[in-house]
Image (tube, helix red, strand yellow):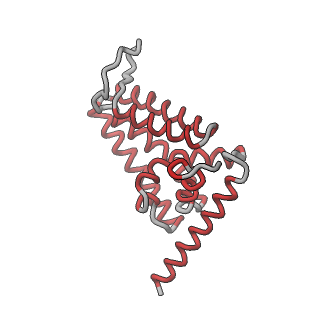
């Protein structure tokens, strides 16, 4: 609460929420966002190490490469946004890196890139259908690519925590975000009407 700029969780969620207000679109994103994150880490496994490191003591294929850097960046960002849900999102990000590394190591590049391609095509197609058919608004990534990619996994996690456990980062968070989302959607619809008339 009270954070500004890049670490303003309310601002991030209001931006992302304005593009994801339809329940079916939210469900589609809940199902597909984390698999996109995971499969991105699978393909990033095949990038070179960013620094040499001692053996981890077991041969499961954990390499400190760009996949690791990607996961740690997300983890640190989420943990800085919110202590509880952010820490959970950070843990999930790092577990995805471990799982993706183990899977990629076992599959090998020649099979892994095919699995990643199919998974990414299915997940992205599902999300674009969610936006086109149900949300009737272009995805957030068309307006702010970095923010959309960074916030998507945390957004769906927080949606699940709020829906099932009533969690909010601080008292009044969801009401404040909803007010901003409603205002953004109203402005979007108004601008859309002006363009049509």
> Residue visible at 27% across and 29% down?
48
Relative to the observer, which residue lies in front, 43 or 49? 49
* Residue 136 in sight here: yes
Total labels drawn: 0
Q: Position of residue 41 (x, y in %)?
A: 39, 36
Q: Position of residue 145 (x, y in %)?
A: 41, 55
- Residue 98 picture quarter: top left
Q: Position of residue 126 (x, y in %)?
A: 46, 55
Q: Position of residue 76 (x, y in %)?
A: 50, 36
> Residue visible at 54% across and 54% down?
12
> Residue visible at 36% across and 45% down?
118
> Residue visible at 34% across and 30% down?
65
Left or right: 140 as drawn, with respect to 48: right
Vertical position of residue 183 compared to residue 104: above or below? below
Vertical position of residue 111 compared to residue 59: above or below? below
* Residue 106 in sight here: no
Left or right: 161 as drawn, with respect to 61: right
Relative to the observer, which residue lies in front, 40 or 179? 179
Vertical position of residue 147 compared to residue 92: above or below? below
Left or right: 163 as drawn, with respect to 133: right
Relative to the observer, which residue lies in front, 137 or 68? 68
Work out which residue is located at the far bottom of the displayed protein and give it: 197
């Amino acid at each position: 609460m009270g954070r500004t700029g890049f670490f303003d969780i309310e601002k991030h969620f209001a931006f992302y929420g304005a593009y994801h207000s339809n329940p079916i679109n939210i469900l589609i994103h809940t199902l597909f966002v984390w698999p996109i994150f995971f499969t991105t880490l699978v393909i990033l496994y095949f990038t070179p190490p960013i620094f040499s490191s001692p053996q981890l003591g077991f041969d499961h294929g954990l390499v400190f490469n760009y996949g690791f850097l990607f996961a740690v960046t997300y983890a640190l960002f989420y943990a800085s946004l919110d202590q509880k849900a952010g820490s959970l999102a950070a843990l999930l990000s790092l577990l995805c890196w471990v799982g993706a590394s183990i899977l990629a190591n076992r599959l090998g590049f020649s099979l892994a890139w095919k699995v990643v391609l199919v998974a990414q095509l299915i997940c992205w197609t599902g999300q674009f259908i969610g936006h086109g058919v149900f949300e009737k608004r272009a995805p957030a990534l068309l307006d702010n690519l970095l923010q959309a990619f960074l916030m998507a996994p945390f957004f769906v996690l927080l949606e699940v925590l709020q829906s099932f456990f009533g969690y909010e980062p601080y008292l009044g968070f969801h009401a404040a975000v909803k007010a901003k989302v409603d205002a953004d959607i109203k402005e979007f619809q108004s601008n859309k009407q002006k363009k049509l008339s």
